[in-house]
Image: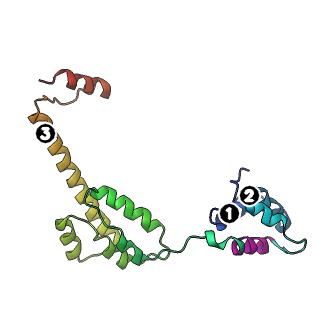
Amino acid sequence: MNLDKYDELTNPREPIQNVRRSLELVIDDNDVMCKILPTIFRGNVKKWYNNLKPGYVLSFQDLCAQLVMHFSTNIPMKKSSIELFGVIQGEKDSTRAYLRRFNEEMLQVEDLLELITCEALKGVKSEELWKQLHSLQDRTLQRVKQMIESHIRVEEALAARRSFSQIYREGVRVEPPNMNRSPVDRQRMLKERAF
């Protein structure tokens, strides 16, 4: 069994959950769990544990409660759905980058409220997309994300088209790739055929 070491710099609930998950598969003995949890402590957490008076901790649950209470300043604050309104698409952000960032923030929200999340997803810079999202009747998170992903596909296709047009204007003749060649060979061929 390989358990990550714990110091006071991170959330104390994480190592407790890791030890519980790992040990409950093998053993459900309170005394053994009390002895194994401290083996992952290091730094100030180990000093804290070593300074506990004998008999102070009565059970694994008690040890976990003491650990969380003592290192509670490292427990991240819960995020709410309202905080998702702070995630907006920057001027240079692609819609894909915006949606990726929004999804990362959304994962940190406990008790996600779908209606508020759908409204917060209107933080896009495309006025056209914003209008589509605003006029959407069936406003579920799945439907809103589908609409944004559809916009992303169009946005990326237009970007590829502009890129292709620019290459063509600059005098590079581009031919359909020969599927018998490797991507490196195809790139080399394109460079050799430049005007």
Please tell me which residue lies in front, 86 or 145: 86
Report the span colored magenta: 60-69
**Residue type of the residue flagged with mark 2:** Gly
Q: Whole-percent x and y of residue 49?
A: 80, 65
Q: Which mark is residue 166?
A: 3
**Where residue 63 sits: x, y (%)?**
78, 71
Marker disc for residue 51: none
Q: Name the residue at 65% across, 73% down.
A: 72
Asked whether the residues under the numbered discs 1 and 2 touch, taking CB atoms below 8 Å apart as contact, a structural biologist would say yes
Most distant residue in the top direction = 192
Q: Which residue is mark 1?
A: 8
Task: Give the class, few, some or many, for how many residues have Cα within 10 Å of label 1's Cα (few <14, many ≥20).
Answer: some
Inspect the magenta stretch and tell me whether residue 184 lies in it.
no
Q: Quadrant of residue 54?
A: bottom right
* Amino acid type for the residue under numbered disc 1: Glu
> Nearer the N terminus, badge 1 or badge 3?
1
Is 96 situated left or right of 60 in this image? left
Q: Can you see residue 27?
A: no
Instruction: Say above or below: 67 vs 38.
Output: below
Q: For the residues marked 1 and 2, what is the alpha-carbon distance in whole angstroms?
A: 8 Å
In the rendered image, which quarter is residue 21 located in?
bottom right
User: Is 65 included in the stretch rendered in magenta?
Assistant: yes
Q: Which label belongs to residue 43?
A: 2
Looking at numbered disc 3 in the image, what kind of residue is underneath it?
Answer: Gln
Q: Residue at x 46, y 77 (%)?
A: 80
| Label 2 SS | helix
Residue 114 position in % (x across, y down):
38, 76
